[in-house]
Amino acid sequence: MKKLSAVLLVFVMAFSVMHVFAEGIAEDVLVKVKGKIEVPRELTEFRYSENKYDDVLRYDFTWNSKDYGKELYVSTDSLGRIVTYNYYEQMDYSADRTLIDYTTEDARPLAEETIKIMFPEYGIEKLVLNEDKITSNYSGRYKTFSFNFERVNDIKVESNRVVVRIRATKDKMYVQSVNASLDEDAKFISVDAKEHFDTAGDYEEKFPIRLYYATDYSGKEPSVKLFYSIDKGYLEIATGNALQEEYFDRYAGMTEDSVSMEAGGTLMNKNEAMLTDEEKGEIGKMESLVKPEEVEKVLRSLSILKITDDMKFSESYTYKSDSKYFVNFTLQGEKRHMNVSYNGETGEVINISSYFTKYDRASDEVIDFITPEDEIKVLTKSLSGTKLDETKVEFTKNNNRAVMSAKRIVNGVAFPENNINVTYDAEEEMVTRYSISWADDTSSFPNPEDVIGLDAAREIIFKDDVSTVWLKQKEGYVGAVTIPEAVTINAIDGEELYKNINEKLAYTDVKNHWAEDIINALWEHDIYVEGGKFTPDEAITQADMIRLFSACRDSGIIPIGWDDIRISSYALEEGFVEAAEPEKLMARIEGFEALIEILGYGDVADFDIYKSSYTDMEPNGSAEILKAMGVLVGGTARPDDNLTYAEAAVMVYRYLSK
């Protein structure tokens, strides 16, 4: 096993020759930075910038090689304290996939040493490694280990942490990134903690357990279920009052990316010369849908929308999604545009969005106004019919806008996913936004009478004791009580939702097995089957075989979240198998042929050029190619025997180790 001596990144106090720029704080900051890291000699190009926002000064330093194959980026605050560290090294992605010998235990000392050197004022005594959040990920050409160090000042300091990621290739291991979120100038307020508000009852009083419907996507098919849930919140130790965390105003290296999702669907067009009968049928269906001008007429009759005469119909498009047809169209005016979406079969409007192209308001002064609740409800009933009667309506104000939020109630229980939202602009005296989300059928929803009850839910939710933390407030950090994580459970059976349903469990049934080391080596590389049991001597199913064999494909391992049906359907689409039968027990010859297809040698295997090197098998291209690769060994192939989990694992291991 390769050890820490192979580490690329070495931290030293000396620093190399750098570009010379004006004397000042930046130079001092760079000196401090290079006292904590080493810049590899080949990174000869240097760039520097400083940025200021909200009176916070940030320094960015970048070194790279002339060919940009390697780059080191460091960002700090004005005192030279490291916030972000990223080292990039270009990899040869054309190389064969391979197993990586480095383990989590090899990477851990490097992560701890990084903390000691980059954050000497804390060290691993005040930045404590969270053992439960150590993760590893195997890509096929490298491994990434992630270590989460949480700040402790006798007790945990909430939202203060450093994440260190280590990358290991076949030949070396190095620090890939460091992201620090530390309130460096925190002030901790001493409290008399004789009375701790640390019981489940005290916590639940301020953050009550909720019962509601929600769609559960954790199974093979989405389904609506009943759930209990409690939010993660905070109670001040000294008073028992509920607290909101104040975020510290310092540049933080860790960010959350927002991903916009666009609804799936197929845009239809009418090209008669190339249409199939099926396509002609779809177009015929499209032409029978409610026309945009019919919906436009309804909207113009609603005065609170203030659709002016200059707002003219400009464009529309129709698409199909989940067997439903939708139409979008736009009304454009000199100062304002309106986008509208509706159900093409029923004409029901599902979204209205107005925006101004010319913003000519004199000021943004907040005005005093009365929300026209009755008019907004008339609009809503005109567009949604009686659905408003099935909701709980709430009006709120924000600056010069009022919002109606109507959440659906089913069987006396809230179903927040189904809702109607309306935004009213008080200065323009009109509704600018309308949206509705609604399920057509709720007959399959669980019965609230079947829930386990609050007492049973409380026992499950508070299975882990509440804990004390330091929580940021305007005046400083105060002691607070919280639960480790927000918890949501199935209200019918008590099963926890949103936990790691694909948790990587160590196998309990491979000890002393002839393939134990190989099976565990694959597990270490995230090549595994779920559930904590490998059943090495049992016949492998089609879905699990494809899951394991996919580690050999160039694009990497199939996502562990895919269920068996999806895996087999994918395998059929790609030509790896002849039929999608996820539970089918696979013969060895079927395994040989599937692996060859995954490796991309299916056409070559079909050539009539092979002679059999096995005593129990006619010539077979797949078996001969795998033998030439060293994936199969020996003089017998046993083609009709079942392929076992252990045998499949050995084939993967031999291919990746060749």
Image (spheres, rainbow, N blue to C red):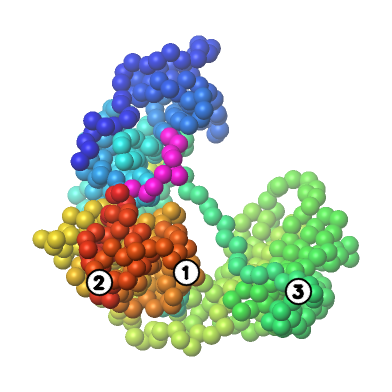
Mark 3 element type: helix
Q: Which residues are magenta?
A: 89-98
- Residue under label 1, please give it: 575
First of labels 1, 3 by sequence position: 3
3D distance between C-alphas at marks 2 and 1? 27 Å
In this view of the protein, can residue 402 be seen by the observer? yes
In front: mark 2 or mark 1?
Answer: 2
Q: Position of residue 346 (x, y in %)?
A: 70, 83
> Does 553 appear above or below 52?
below
| Residue drawn at 23 percent across, 40 percent down | 106
In this view of the protein, can residue 73 be seen by the observer? no
**Residue 592 appears left or right of 104:** right
Q: Amino acid at mark 3?
A: Met
> Does 53 appear above or below 364?
above
- Residue under label 3, please give it: 274
| Residue drawn at 37 percent across, 31 percent down | 185
Residue 585 occupies quadrant = bottom left
